[in-house]
Image (tube, rainbow, N blue to C red):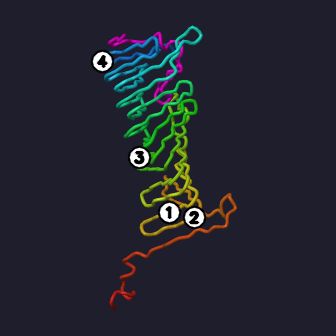
Amino acid sequence: MAYRGLTIVALVAAMMPGLAFADALGLAQSGSGGLEVESDNGIEWRRNEQILIARGNAVATRGTSKINADELRALYRDKDGNTEIYRIEAEGSVVLSSDTDVARGDDAVYDLEQSVVVLTGKDLSYQTPTETLTAEDSLEYWELDRMAVARGNALAMAGERRLRGSVLTARFEAGPNGENELHRIDGYGDVSIRTATEFVVGDEGTYDAKTGIVTLTGSVKITRGDNQLNGDRAVVDLNTGVSRLTSNANGTSGGSSRVRGLLVPDKEENTAPGSPGNGN
């Protein structure tokens, strides 16, 4: 049976704070209220299969939070005499939005039992008022841990700052009004950070959002122009633009490797009067 412009309250009354797509997107708010679902092509209610399907510019709204997709499917079950939605699937041009945050992808699956949202497809992004997280393979949000995971050529952007890695894990803290505030980002695999003057790469890295300091470890390289420094650990202060490179011997691992550098003189110095190669 299909319904046009159907408003669903009874289906979500029993699981209200769990229907959040993510805390970050404002869908896990306390208090009363229902989930309103609308679509251009109506809503199909398969009672025997216990599934609701909204097709054609489908929109699910709770308070100021919305889920937009070409198709929305809500899977529910009977539990202790109540109706419980345990999984929501969104397909096609998915946008999850709140007053402050927006996440985009082609498809999304929200596992309410695990409180985990997984976005897949092209042009994956999760945007807060101050940061943007993108990926090529998937974007995850772990609601209970306040953690976002970007997989596949992941990129975190904040102003002119760029942190890239094969996998980036962003951890948030609750702000004054319950909103997410970035605490730190951990990067794994080909981690890189670019400043106005330098390009720094390493195997792993950690960005402290409070201090603006990035620490990279493992096969670290700092490149500035034609100059390059190699070591085991680099500390980059994004506020001052100062980078410090150390070896394991100076760190905590007790290694014996040394910092190495290749410094290339400026071309102007090579053509100064009296220098070799200037014809004098």
Amino acid of disc 4: Asn
- In the displayed structure, would residue 171 be above or below residue 110? below
Q: Nearer the viewer, mark 2 or mark 4?
A: 4
Single out the residue that lies furthest toward the bottom.
280
Q: Position of residue 68 (x, y in %)?
A: 37, 26
* 6 inside magenta stretch: yes
Quadrant of the image occupied by residue 78: top right
- Quadrant containing the N terminus is top left
Upstream in sequence: badge 1 or badge 4: 4
Upstream in sequence: badge 1 or badge 2: 1
The residue that disc 4 covers is 41
168, 158: nearer the viewer: 168
On the rendered structure, is 182 left or right of 125? right
At a point 39% along the width and 79% down the height, the residue shown is 269
243, 98: nearer the viewer: 98
Q: For mark 1, does the 10 Å Cα neighbourhood hold few (<14), some (14 to 19), or many (20 or more) residues?
A: many
Residue 159 numbered tag: 3
Between the residue at mark 3 and the residue at mark 4, the CA separation in whole angstroms equals 41 Å
User: For the residue labelled by badge 2, is the local secondary structure a helix, a strand or a loop?
Assistant: strand
Single out the residue that lies furthest toward the front.
48
User: For the residue labelled by badge 4, is the local secondary structure a helix, a strand or a loop?
Assistant: loop
Between the residue at mark 1 and the residue at mark 4, the CA separation in whole angstroms equals 56 Å
At a point 50% along the width and 17% down the height, the residue shown is 76
Q: Are marks 1 and 2 in contact (CB under 8 Å)?
A: yes
Q: Are marks 2 and 4 in contact (CB under 8 Å)?
A: no
Q: For mark 2, does the 10 Å Cα neighbourhood hold few (<14), some (14 to 19), or many (20 or more) residues?
A: many
Q: Nearer the viewer, mark 1 or mark 4?
A: 4
Q: Which residues lie in the magenta part?
A: 1-30
